[in-house]
Image (cartoon, rainbow, N blue to C red):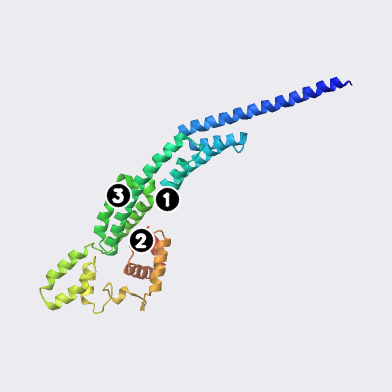
Amino acid sequence: MKKWIWTIIVVVIVALIGGYAYSSHRSMQSQYDTAMADGKSAIQDKKYSEAETDFQNALRHKSNDKTAQAYLNQTQSLVSAESNLQNGHFDVAKSDYNEAKNANNGSSVLVKRAKDGLKNLKTVQLKADTYQQIYDSALTQNRAQQYTASNSTLDRIFNDAEAKQAPYSTVYNKAVDLRSANNKAIKNGGDGTPSDKVTASNSSSSSASSSSASANSNSSSVTGLTDAEKKEAKNYKGKNEYTVGKDRKEINGKTITAKQIQEGRNLITASGLEEGSFSDQDIRDGLIAAHKAGMTYAQYLQKNYK
């Protein structure tokens, strides 16, 4: 075959290969452009899952593309920020919002939404802190056996419709548990009388006689006692934190130990209850009641506090 014929064949082959490569490049570029356009459109509509898929497709058509990667990372950061905000993970949400806001080669739409998210985060976090402060005050009242007052304080949370929203679920659920513990205590004999009222009542009665004053000083040191408990405190000659008789400190004649009380607290926490809502005497009473009922303390908690 003549040399010029071979030359023509080579030229044709090179042209075909070049044409295929060019056509393939054009097709890849077209698919990349389409995927990026779809992703940007999905961002506008806040369809972030679709946007992530589109930007991943763009990277398959043009790997290591900085723009597609920036859009993907930015979208994922914003999604993560909003998820962490709803779950009450405010510090992580702030970090994610900042990543979305400061992204290079990213979407200006997502930058604006990240800035708005940071502003909203401050408002949400402030309200969450307020709810936490209210809860802490109610918990302090509960520990002082001021159960009715504790419930009144918790109403500041329950009367706010926003408190049920997802970002506040942790403190809201704790408030629900605390209200339940208050109601159980009131039902089981706690009268919720604040300590200042008890003290005032005892002070007025102490003027009747010096012996009566001595008895009342014992009962005034404990808030929220029932009439029966106050009578028992008056007649009890020993001295202890709760001014209660031996029958509320012993099981089968054996004193309930600090170790048993701590084990009780561990079970309270494991049951999903607020451990701080139970005084040591609450736990003693529960252990005694569980023993009398022939059940474990865990079963007692499940029956009476769930």
Q: Quadrant of residue 271?
A: bottom left
SS at circle 1: helix
Query: Is residue 46 visible to us here?
Result: no
The residue at which mark 2 appears reads as 304
> Could you tell which of marks 1 and 3 lies nearer the N-terminus?
1
Query: Is residue 210 visible to us here?
Result: yes
Q: CA distance from mark 2 to mark 3?
A: 23 Å
The residue at which mark 1 appears reads as 91
Question: Which residue is at 26% across, 55% downward?
Answer: 153
Q: CA distance from mark 1 to mark 2?
A: 37 Å
Task: Report the mark closest to the observer, 1 or 3.
Answer: 1
**What's the mark number on residue 158?**
3
Question: Which residue is at 31% across, 51% downward?
Answer: 130
Question: Which residue is at 32% across, 59% downward?
Answer: 181
Locate the C terminus by quadrant: bottom left
- Please name the amino acid that badge 1 sits on: Asp
The answer to whether 271 is drawn above or below residue 228 in the figure is: above
